[in-house]
């Protein structure tokens, strides 16, 4: 039997749900007659004090329970997922899709090509708007499901349809305009593919999207990511070179000056990876304004630098700090006086063109660190690990597997350096 409601995985003892007889394995189908499609529906339902809950039991039988609660009182439930009716899957066929470049051996969840506006709202996932129905759009506008994060790539309708291999992709400006006019805040990104959507096309895209400010609040410019498998598969796509990155930075910085003068906001921001490729200094953190796209790799180095400067003296003394090849030069310069060794790890799993720490695997660490870290304390950023599967790397190895293989102590700290005054108390493996 297909279960499409909110499947309960935990009931707090003594909670309203527990007192009403709800149990683990029960499935909430409707509350006050409204179907439960996702955690958003559930949260809206919690605004009522008198709840009539339709429940499907694990044996398929149905029953209803009534709960009268305080206005802000939680029922005390946890669910198997935040999406109760399944994830909306991407319908595009992008030439540069990162998921298509994944090798065997990664966690199955990484192969899910989600394109769901609800995950955009809840977690900041970037969506394309191509699979949203009229009903989805109306729900977003009516309930003010905001902000949303949108992969635009280009405002040129024909080029966007060609890049996405989806005719519906051409409607992006109309859809964005409709959303911002309804009060929905948008954070957009352009994944830049050399020879496709750079140069004059990029200039046009920035100009078009800036017209939607302040509804379109930020625009991130991110270089295309190519694994070694992508380099073999996508013959029409090439990685960024230093010269490419410098040209793009010149364009972005020029537009920042113009938009700051015209609008009072820079609006468009370069990814940290562009700074690394162009061999440029990390700007002051103030130039990232409100850090709208921090988890998209925009401003991370600036935040990390500032947090390291405020870290407790000797916080890294005698430790080995592990990172990808992109951030290693910056970390070495920032931690030079800390008595820490900074080891950069080449990504063999995805290929050396993937340089960020967040895509390193447990096998990469074991292969490259070997006996150099035996008996030492190894510090890893937490973005190497899964959000859903605690202490697990992309290849399925766990922190304790790496610690055992290297005969070392492993400590995991926040990848932005938050809380470094107590960094030595990070999660251990």
Image (cartoon, rainbow, N blue to C red):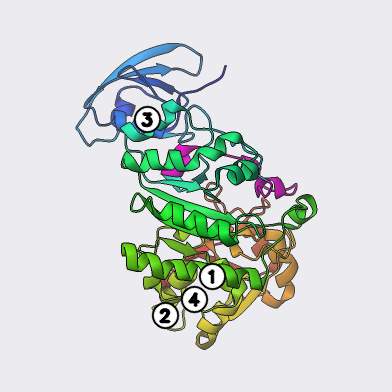
Q: Is residue 141 visible?
A: yes
Q: Say above or below: 333 vs 92.
A: below
Q: Farthest residue to the left: give it.
A: 70
Name the spot of residue 216 as percent of width and height, x first: 39, 51
Q: Say above or below: 191 vs 171.
A: below
Identify the element where label 2 is drawn. Answer: helix
Q: Nearer the viewer, residue 410 or 37?
A: 37
Q: Whole-Å distance between the Cαs marked 1 and 2?
A: 26 Å
Magenta range is: 95-121
- Residue drawn at (49%, 34%) of the image: 80
Name the spot of residue 211 as percent of width and height, x first: 38, 52
Q: Earlier in the sequence, mark 1 or mark 2?
A: 1
Residue corresponding to mark 3: 139
Q: Say above or below: 256 vs 186.
A: below
Identify the element where label 4 is drawn. Answer: loop
Q: Say above or below: 373 vs 44.
A: below
Residue corresponding to mark 1: 249
Q: Verify whether residue 333 appears in magenta.
A: no
Q: Whole-Å distance between the Cαs marked 3 and 2?
A: 45 Å
Residue corresponding to mark 4: 282
């Amino acid at each position: 039997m297909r279960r499409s409601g909110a499947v309960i995985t935990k009931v707090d003892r003594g909670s309203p749900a527990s007192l009403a007889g709800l149990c683990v394995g029960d499935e909430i189908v409707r509350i006050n007659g409204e179907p439960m499609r996702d955690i958003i529906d559930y949260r809206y339902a919690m605004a009522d004090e008198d709840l009539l809950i339709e429940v499907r039991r694990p044996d398929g039988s149905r029953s209803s329970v009534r709960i009268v609660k305080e206005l802000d009182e939680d029922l005390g439930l946890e669910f198997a997922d935040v999406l109760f009716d399944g994830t909306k899957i991407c319908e595009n066929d992008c030439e540069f899709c990162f998921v298509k470049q994944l090798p065997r051996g990664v966690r199955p969840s990484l192969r899910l090509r989600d394109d769901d506006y609800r995950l955009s709202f809840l977690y900041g996932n970037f969506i394309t708007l191509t699979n949203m129905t009229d009903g989805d759009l109306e729900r977003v506008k009516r309930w003010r499901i905001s902000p949303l994060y949108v992969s635009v790539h280009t405002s040129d309708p024909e080029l966007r349809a060609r890049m996405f291999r989806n005719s519906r992709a051409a409607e992006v400006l109309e859809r964005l305009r409709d959303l911002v006019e309804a009060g929905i805040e948008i954070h957009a990104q352009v994944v830049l593919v050399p020879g496709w959507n750079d140069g004059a096309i990029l200039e046009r895209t920035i100009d078009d999207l800036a017209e939607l400010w302040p509804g379109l609040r930020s625009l991130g410019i991110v270089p295309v990511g190519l694994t070694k498998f992508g380099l073999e598969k996508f013959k029409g796509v090439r990685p960024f070179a230093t010269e490419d990155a410098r040209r793009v930075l010149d364009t972005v910085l020029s537009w920042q000056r113009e938009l700051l003068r015209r609008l009072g906001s820079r609006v468009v921001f370069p990814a940290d990876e562009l700074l690394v490729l162009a061999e440029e200094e990390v700007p002051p953190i103030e130039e990232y304004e409100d850090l709208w796209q921090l988890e998209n790799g925009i401003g991370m180095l600036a935040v990390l630098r500032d947090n390291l400067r405020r870290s407790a003296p000797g916080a890294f003394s005698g430790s080995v700090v592990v990172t990808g090849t992109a951030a290693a030069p910056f970390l070495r310069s920032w931690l030079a006086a800390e008595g820490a060794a900074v080891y950069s790890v080449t990504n063999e799993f995805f290929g050396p063109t993937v340089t960020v720490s967040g895509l390193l695997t447990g096998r990469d660490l074991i292969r490259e660190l070997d006996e150099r870290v035996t008996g030492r304390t190894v510090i890893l950023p937490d973005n190497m690990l899964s959000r859903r599967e605690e202490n697990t790397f992309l290849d399925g190895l766990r922190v304790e597997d790496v610690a055992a293989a290297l005969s070392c102590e492993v400590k995991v700290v926040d990848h932005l350096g938050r809380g470094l005054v107590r960094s030595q108390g990070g999660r251990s493996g």
